[in-house]
Image (cartoon, rainbow, N blue to C red):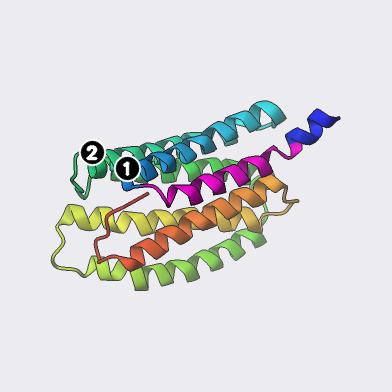
Amino acid sequence: MATTGVHRRLWLIYLAAGLAAAAGSLLLPDLPQSIVYDLVGFSAVVAILYGVRLHRPARRGIWYGLASGLVVFVAGDVVYSVYVYVLDIEPFPSPADGLYLASYPILAAALLVMIRSRTGGRDRTGLIDALIITTGLGLLSWTFLMRPIASDPSLTAGTRLISLAYPLADVLLLAVLARLFTSPGGRSASYRLLGAAVVLQLGTDIVYAGSQSPAPTRVG
């Protein structure tokens, strides 16, 4: 019984350790800070895989898909860190952007399978609600993020395309998240934590993009 209790509190222990590592990394120089940041990202992948082994969910492929998306995303962070802190260059676009953008459809696909397992392809009301939410937020993204990029004459076609791909990918992930939370059924702690993680990721993307010039360089 004691072991079961420890297992149930593991996510709290991991969350506290992750927050402590993230906060402590702010006191480090740039390169060590980036290394800690990347290690925290990879630890999330390990946490998902350990959780699957521990709880043995019926649809393990969903969680493996989420872990795969995170691996690709964190790999983008590693590549970006090598460029900036080792090679002392900051190219845009770069291979890091390809990895970042590749992670979005992987994560979205895993979430769509999760939604499908909850709804069985039904629940039109939830679908309409999700479309309303996505349309409103997509309009805001176009007005404040995408339109300035699309209308900037100083950008090359490739730079403009990659710069637009980020807010588009965010809208895609937001649409899937909205659909997940308008689907019927209960919400376990894993669902709530997953939703919070995606919201925080989207929030940091939007804040960072809004603080940059029309062609922001990605930091992960």
Q: Which residue in the structure is indicated by mark 1?
A: 31
Residue 150 image position (x, y, % from top left): 24, 66
Residue 61 visible:
no
Q: Nearer the viewer, residue 175 or 152?
A: 152
Q: Which residue in the structure is indicated by mark 2?
A: 86
- In this picture, is 124 found above or below 76? below
> Distance from label 2 to label 1 (Cα)?
8 Å
Secondary structure state at the residue bearing disc 2: helix
Taking the spot 34% from the left edge, 40% from the top edge, the residue there is 76
Mark 2 or 1 closer to N-term?
1
Residue 195 visible:
yes
Q: Which disc number belongs to residue 184? A: none
Taking the spot 23% from the left edge, 41% from the top edge, the residue there is 83
Secondary structure state at the residue bearing disc 1: helix
Q: Is residue 16 magenta?
A: yes
Residue 42 image position (x, y, % from top left): 47, 35
Magenta span: predominant SS is: helix
Q: Nearer the viewer, residue 176 or 18?
A: 18
Label total for image: 2
- Is 217 placed left or right of 3 in the picture? left
- The part of the chain drawn in magenta is 8-28
Taking the spot 31% from the left edge, 52% from the top edge, the residue there is 218
- In this picture, is 15 found above or below 62? below
Query: What amino acid is labelled 1 in the image?
Result: Leu
Q: Nearer the viewer, residue 25 or 200?
A: 25
Query: What amino acid is labelled 2 in the image?
Result: Val
